[in-house]
Image (spheres, rainbow, N blue to C red):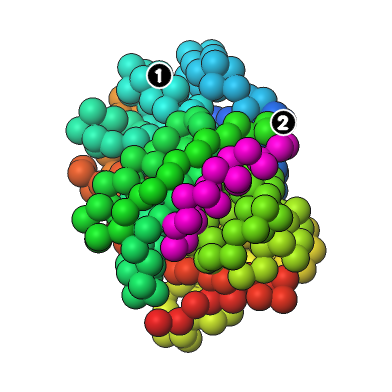
């Protein structure tokens, strides 16, 4: 894991830094997450992972720099996200920012990051958060994109003989992102979308959408949502009589999905990142060690089986920020806060083969997602557990 490399590097620099402990440069990293509100379910594990990383970093007494984290809760409200990121940059002096939990908030803060020329690492899924990279030079992200995961899922559907598909998704920017990618990719692969239904994050009754979906008689259903709605709409489909395969995007492979859906989500096929299947990875997979170490630390602090996808996205967001600071310090670059922010952005964009807990990151001037097919898996719920689907 990169944090292990960071730890090793820190000890190598220990001798030189020890005598200058009082004059170490301080880098402020601002963090904004949805600790409360509609997205609190997915922000909770990310916040736990960020706290874990802060503790691990604090234990490194010989780093040649100090990191001060400043964290706020945007209550799942994009307007608050914008105001808090602006506060971090204009008042708190943040050198880099980690924000936000959701796609709507991450899209909302992109202009703030660009105008203030401050690198911001989002934990939201939509590719629109960072694309086009030529216009969103200061936005980066840690989750896999809908495009990559949906493409992988559709390839599997084609192998299973799926010809027609129904879509169910959130009516916000996250759901729209999934719909746009699914519509474009399905057509290219010869799959016809025969119905599309939407729902809000706070909805609790999904029967009308489920009934319309059943009437469309598709070979399969694809749901683009997060728990709890991902679980509840799945349950509604089963309750009104849908018997075909039900697929989910990468926002669903969490403990909450199964806890909420219970037996109703048995058989669900879900897009997943390596954290969900790390026990099944080959020993020579470069992610086996990094994810194994993360799970050991996370479960050791919060309980067995607690490490999951949203935790990895938060952990890697702060990990990538601190790794960037490390390389900036090593480079010997100097400058005021404005220049430092620009240099940190440039360093972040040079991230190469960073083995985190989400996957292996390689940011470039044209790719601020940085992940590839090594991060893509499909799992199926069997006996209340996610099981890797092997080709």
Answer few, some or many: residues within 10 Å of disc 1's Cα (few below 14, many 20 plus, some between 14 and 19): some
Q: Could you tell whether 349 is left or right of 309 in the image?
A: left
Most distant residue in the bottom direction: 283
Given residues 339 and 10, the one toward you in this image is: 339
Residue at 52 percent of width and 49 percent of height:
215
Residue 5 rendering spot, x and y as whole percentages: 47, 65
Residue at 55 percent of width and 52 percent of height:
214
Q: Please tell me whether residue 4 is drawn above or below residue 71 in the rendered image.
A: below
Magenta highlight range: 204-222
Q: Could you tell whether 255 is left or right of 196 in the image?
A: right
Residue 43 rendering spot, x and y as whole percentages: 64, 41
How far is the residue under mark 1 from the one under mark 2? 22 Å
Residue assigned mark 1: 112
Residue 159 rendering spot, x and y as whole percentages: 34, 75
Residue 92 rendering spot, x and y as whole percentages: 55, 19
Q: Could you tell whether 25 is left or right of 232 in the image?
A: left
Residue at 44 percent of width and 23 percent of height:
109
Answer few, some or many: residues within 10 Å of disc 2's Cα (few below 14, many 20 plus, some between 14 and 19): some
Tag in front: 1 or 2: 2
Residue assigned mark 2: 36
- Helix, strand or loop at label 2? It is loop
Q: Please tell me whether residue 349 is drawn above or below residue 120 in the rendered image.
A: below
27 part of magenta stretch: no
């Amino acid at each position: 894991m990169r944090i292990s490399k960071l730890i090793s590097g820190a000890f190598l620099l220990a001798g030189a830094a020890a005598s200058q402990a009082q004059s170490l440069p301080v880098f402020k990293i601002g963090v904004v997450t949805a600790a409360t509100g509609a997205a609190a379910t997915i922000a909770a594990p990310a916040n736990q992972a960020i706290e874990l990383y802060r503790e691990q970093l604090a234990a490194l007494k010989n780093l040649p720099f100090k990191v001060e984290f400043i964290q706020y809760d945007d209550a799942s409200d994009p307007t608050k996200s914008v105001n808090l990121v602006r506060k971090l940059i204009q008042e708190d002096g943040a050198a880099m920012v980690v924000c936000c939990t959701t796609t709507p908030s991450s899209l909302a803060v992109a202009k703030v990051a660009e105008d203030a020329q401050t690198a911001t690492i989002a934990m939201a899924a939509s590719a629109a958060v960072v694309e086009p990279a030529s216009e969103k030079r200061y936005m980066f992200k840690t989750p896999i994109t809908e495009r990559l995961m949906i493409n992988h899922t559709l390839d599997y559907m084609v192998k299973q003989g799926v010809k027609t598909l129904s879509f169910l998704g959130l009516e916000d920017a996250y759901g729209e992102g999934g719909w746009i990618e699914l519509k474009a990719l399905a057509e290219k692969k010869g799959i016809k979308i025969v119905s599309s239904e939407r729902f809000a994050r706070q909805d609790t009754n999904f029967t009308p959408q489920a009934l319309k979906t059943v009437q469309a008689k598709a070979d399969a259903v694809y749901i683009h949502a997060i728990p709890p709605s991902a679980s509840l709409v799945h349950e509604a489909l089963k309750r009104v009589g849908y018997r075909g395969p039900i697929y989910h995007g990468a926002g669903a492979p969490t403990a909450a999905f199964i806890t909420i859906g219970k037996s109703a989500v048995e058989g669900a096929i879900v897009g997943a990142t390596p954290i969900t299947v790390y026990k099944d990875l080959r020993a020579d997979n470069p992610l086996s060690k990094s994810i194994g170490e993360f799970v050991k630390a996370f479960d050791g602090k919060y309980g067995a089986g607690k490490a999951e996808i949203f935790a990895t996205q938060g952990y890697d967001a702060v990990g990538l920020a601190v790794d960037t600071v490390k390389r900036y310090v090593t480079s010997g670059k100097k400058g005021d806060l404005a220049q430092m922010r620009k240099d940190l952005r440039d360093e972040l964009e040079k991230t190469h083969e960073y083995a985190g807990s989400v996957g292996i990151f390689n940011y470039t001037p044209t790719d601020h997602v940085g992940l590839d097919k090594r991060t893509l898996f499909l799992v199926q719920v069997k006996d209340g557990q996610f099981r890797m689907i092997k080709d």
